[in-house]
Image (tube, coloured by chain):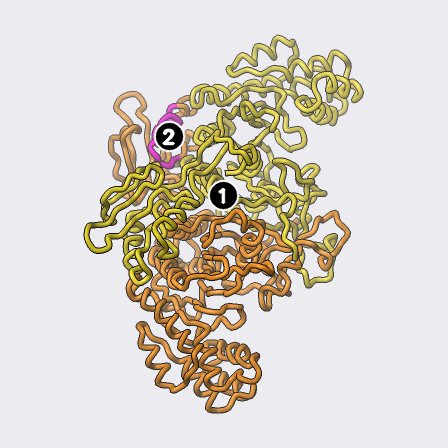
Chain colours: A orange, B yellow
Amino acid sequence: VKITPISGFPEYLPAERIVEQEFLDVIRSTFELHGFPSIETRAVEPVERLVGKGGDADKEIYAVSRLAADDGPADAQLGLHFDLTVPFARYVLENAGHLAFPFRRHQIQKVWRGERPQEGRYREFTQADIDVVDVGELAPHFEAEMPLVIAEVFRKLPVGRMVIQVSNRMIPEGFYLGLGIGSEDITEIQQTLRIVDKLDKIGAAKVREALLEAGRTPVQADQCLALAAIRTEDLSFVDQVRALGVEHPTLDAGLEALSAVIQSGLENAPGAMVADLKIARGLDYYTGTVYETQLVGHESWGSFCSGGRYDSLASDGKTTYPGVGISIGVSRLLGLMLGQGLLTASRSTPACVLVAVNDEPSRAESTGVATALRERGIPCEVAPKAAKFGRQIKYAERRGIPFVWFLAAGEGGDQVKDIRSGDQVDADATAWTPPARDLRPQVLSGQLTESGRP
Amino acid sequence: VKITPISGFPEYLPAERIVEQEFLDVIRSTFELHGFPSIETRAVEPVERLVGKGGDADKEIYAVSRLAADDGPADAQLGLHFDLTVPFARYVLENAGHLAFPFRRHQIQKVWRGERPQEGRYREFTQADIDVVDVGELAPHFEAEMPLVIAEVFRKLPVGRMVIQVSNRMIPEGFYLGLGIGSEDITEIQQTLRIVDKLDKIGAAKVREALLEAGRTPVQADQCLALAAIRTEDLSFVDQVRALGVEHPTLDAGLEALSAVIQSGLENAPGAMVADLKIARGLDYYTGTVYETQLVGHESWGSFCSGGRYDSLASDGKTTYPGVGISIGVSRLLGLMLGQGLLTASRSTPACVLVAVNDEPSRAESTGVATALRERGIPCEVAPKAAKFGRQIKYAERRGIPFVWFLAAGEGGDQVKDIRSGDQVDADATAWTPPARDLRPQVLSGQLTESGRP
């Protein structure tokens, strides 16, 4: 069997994986600091639970069936999940009797989509989600909490400045109703949202054209574009909307709700959020606050982190579970940053020390040194071969291991060498400690390499 | 769609997941202390790479195909991996030019098998593997290193005593050759190994019967059983084998190799290993040291951790990559222990503190306290509702959150209450620290609950 990569299923070399682990560790620990316990759901769901849930996702579902079975994918009972929201909604319904509401959870898992692969778009990728779900009603302060958690994640990640764009679906809906859009045919609102949602992709002129084609009047089209152009870091978006002269109770409710979220951002994460009224998440079933993100300087890469409020995240017919959540597209973000050489790891192994071996009969003594270092939390390995010391140092160098430990052979005691500087000092395996920055591999940002790979 | 669990695809409640995370964290950090970097491979492999690789695993493969595609599973190009060894071998061949050999890695991922589900046997489960692979030749000391890493993992996990049973495939092979088995027809050796491998399952009498049926002489059968009965914690297995009076150079090599592994265990992990000559891993392609494990007191649960040495882990026709590895069946171990109520988590959330809310207008002040606690690494959440304090305490109680923080309302300062003891003391959010044992959820062992669930 010839070995070739499978398009859309990326794999990392060890140094790249260290960068990914750093990202996942920061995300998990931040989610935990905010009191979101982890759950994992199985990779598969019944196909009929997946179909029709993801907007255009139907065609993207991977069916799973036993190879030995006769039935084709069309008869498949199971499919791989394409996001973490559909499985979470099912998990809530299945375990409602065992969960305490409001229920918070985080979930970091792979998802699969049969999409056409392209840069930063994969068929297998990792998402990291937080959601809060409650029974019947969900307090609005959770809509303000989500972006604060995300802002903290991105403050801690070495990705540069990430801006969270926030809006509220009630704003365009109320505004459109106030303009007379949807007053006779409610589907006009969704249709208008979808067209305006393309603003970043196709530009204002084409959006205006599409709105006119869809039956909006020139005044309506211009007003829709004026609303979508409003973007403020503070609460002044309210006055800018009011200045457009459109009135509707749903618009009032939306402006009040978004003000609360932005106000919370100003107090708790200054500079992290912006009220951006073009954000609609057109294809999704959000009903309140909606979130997208932009990496400053890489706006063309699109949003790496999106979400919003659903009035009905899950429902079993009797009980409705409203929720709010946000999802980080970890693989997309990493894939683009690694691909551009914007992130590298300082070494390709967790080992901080290579313990040299004087000769094979004394390997047990080198193992003893390694054990003593590990007992104090210092990752290390023992040289694979009692080769010349130069070759043992080379082994450490190739992997970026910063220290090589030499055992006393006869006179004198042990010594440890920083192979970057060449400094070599006396050392005791029960007491020596590396500098904190060397204990674990570091993720370095902005170091462009020729190949774009660490 | 009616919601029912899918047989063989277990899911955990948050408190159970906390136990699983603790296991995975201990496993990963121990692997890293020993200098094994992490890799992950994609969930899918070309079907032709999976078929025929897993002994009886062929019928267990899950095919993956796009739901919209016409081809049935028999035409499938891709299948879900059923272990982490086959993908690792492929990864080594694919990336050989980018890896430094001997190459160490750990890999903790889900795998899938279409097996009939039963207690502790799943269709989706997590494995945690370490392997070392080299080019052309692999130094034997790596065979001694593997069980030391595993012994350290199990010393740190709250599972009771785990014994690693070690043998070497050269011992039965050389012994059988010395007895005349396989001297004319080499397949007799594999056949004999497979029969003896059933010893624990069917007992000595039935194994003897099966050996006779397979054409072994009564003397050969008795000698095979005598060899398989040898089990020693020290090096005395060598004398016991010698006392059986069988001689062969391969037997000598096997005894010497096993002695080196057991000697290393005696020096570095006393009590963790036993030489157990019935261990053969009959269906697998091991060529040297082989490992299984027994949980003391739960021997009937079988092995949770197995592996061995392959002379040809991977090969591209020109270059051969020998390897040695071992795999922990995390889900099997956890499923049985959680199912029996042998492990519980002290709470169902990472939050250590619930910050109470005096009234909704002052929620921002409670958020400020939470931020101050988080800045010092204390996981917390803010009460979802400014309800009566009794109800806010109830919220913490249901989740096992040990502390509730009350903000000064008017006179006096903040106070924090340990809701288990009722102790309430003055506290400052920029200085107060919980006892170390309360900072994160603890995994408690041996606490049988009525339902067997935490």
- Report x, y in % for residue B237: 56, 14
Q: Is residue A193 above or below residue B168?
A: below
Instruction: Determine crowd level at label 1: few under 14, some 14-19, many 20+ residues with C-alpha closer than 10 A.
Output: many
Left or right for B121, reference A193: right
- Report x, y in % for residue B50: 66, 45
Residue B327 in sight here: no
Occupied quadrant, residue A157: bottom left
Residue A236 in sight here: yes
Residue in view at x 50 percent, y 65 percent: A311
Q: Secondary structure at mark 1?
A: helix
Disc 2 to disc 1, C-alpha distance: 32 Å
Residue closest to the eye, A413 or A318: A318
Residue closest to the eye, A218 or B275: A218
Q: Which residues are magenta?
A: A365-380
Instruction: Determine crowd level at label 2: few under 14, some 14-19, many 20+ residues with C-alpha closer than 10 A.
Output: many
Camera-near label (2 vs 1) is 1
Q: Is residue A369 magenta?
A: yes
- Report x, y in % for residue A404: 34, 35
Parent chain of label 2: A
- Res A370 label: 2
- Res B17 label: 1
Q: Is residue A150 magenta?
A: no
Occupied quadrant, residue A175: bottom left
Residue closest to the eye, B312 or A217: A217
Residue closest to the eye, A24 or B197: A24
The amino acid pointed to by label 2 is: Ala
